[in-house]
Amino acid sequence: MYLHVGNDVVVHHPDVIGIFDLENTSVSKYTKEYLRMKQQDNRVIDVTQDIPKSFVITCDKKGQEKVYLSLLAPRTLKKRWEEIE
């Protein structure tokens, strides 16, 4: 199964590590550093052309993490994720 994260982008449901509210979590210096490092590693995929509201972290079977920036609210993504389970 797949989770739709916005703009016709889907991620493999079992690969989802977490869904986070960008506004609330980006206050932390650790989150800022994590996102900055993933950006430098070209592991951030921006699926919106506006200000993102959330981000989804995935990890595939090879251990490769990706961060998807989404326009969708974290509550919406969480609800979709729960519907899949």
Image (spheres, grey):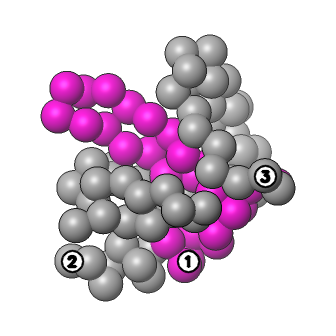
Q: What stretch is highlighted in magenta?
A: 51-77
Q: Would you identify the image quadrant in which residue 73 lies?
A: bottom right
Element type where label 3 sits in the image: loop
Residue at 55 percent of width and 77 percent of height: 75
User: Mark 2 vs mark 3: which is more N-terminal?
Assistant: 3
Query: For mark 1, does the 10 Å Cα neighbourhood hold few (<14), some (14 to 19), or many (20 or more) residues?
Result: few
Q: Mark 3 points at which residue?
A: 49
**How far apart are labels 2 and 1 at the CA level?**
16 Å
Residue at numbered disc 2: 85
Marks 2 and 3 sit apart, C-alpha to C-alpha, by: 29 Å
Q: Which amino acid does label 3 sit on?
A: Gln
Q: How many numbered discs?
A: 3
Q: In which quarter of the image is the C terminus?
A: bottom left
Res 54 seen here? no
| Residue under label 1 | 75
Front residue of 3/21: it is 3
Return the x and y of residue 71 as percentages of the image width and height.
69, 63
Look at 69% across and 40% down and name the residue there: 28
Q: Give the residue at x 41% y 78%.
A: 80
Instruction: Kindly report the distance in space between the C-alpha atoms of the residues bearing marks 1 and 3.
Output: 20 Å
